[in-house]
Image (spheres, rainbow, N blue to C red):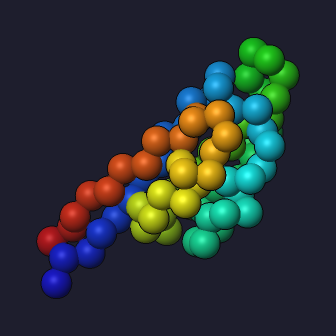
């Protein structure tokens, strides 16, 4: 049976570090990083990308539209 694996891409310049995505992630994949963007915000990043299921909760809830979610079927 095929397994669905997800991946997220965060636009660091659009992210304001509100942290809503970190709470909405059921797999605890997303954290606020230690680096800041050009606006001085700590931006979200995938800490454990292998655990991502591609559910898209983070992309849907992001108020800035800074997260894109991709899903890949693994055989």
**On the picture, is 35 further left or further right than 44?**
right
Residue extending farthest to the top is 38
- In the rendered image of this protein, does residue 73 appear above or below residue 11? below
x, y percentage for residue 27?
A: 58, 71
Question: Can residue 60 be seen?
Answer: yes
x, y percentage for residue 30?
A: 64, 55
- In the rendered image of this protein, does residue 33 appear above or below residue 72? above
- In the rendered image of this protein, does residue 28 appear above or below residue 41? below
Residue sitting at 57 percent across and 36 percent down? 65
State the image quarter where residue 42 is shown.
Answer: top right
State the image quarter where residue 4 is shown.
Answer: bottom left
Residue sitting at 48 percent across and 57 percent down? 56
x, y percentage for residue 6?
A: 39, 59
State the image quarter where residue 35 is shown.
Answer: top right
Tell me the quadrant of the picture where the N terminus can be found: bottom left
* Total marks in image: 0
Tell me the quadrant of the picture where the C terminus can be found: bottom left
**On the picture, is 33 further left or further right than 64?**
right
- In the rendered image of this protein, does residue 67 appear above or below residue 5? above
Residue extending farthest to the right is 40
x, y percentage for residue 5?
A: 34, 64
Question: Can residue 35 be seen?
Answer: no
Residue sitting at 54 percent across and 51 percent down? 60
């Amino acid at each position: 049976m095929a397994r669905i694996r997800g991946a997220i891409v965060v636009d660091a310049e659009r992210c304001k570090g509100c942290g809503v995505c970190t709470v909405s992630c059921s797999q605890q994949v997303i954290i606020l990083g230690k680096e800041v963007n050009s606006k001085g915000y700590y931006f979200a990043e995938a800490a454990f990308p292998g655990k991502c299921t591609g559910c898209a909760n983070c992309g849907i809830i992001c108020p800035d539209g800074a997260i894109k979610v991709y899903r890949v079927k693994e055989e």
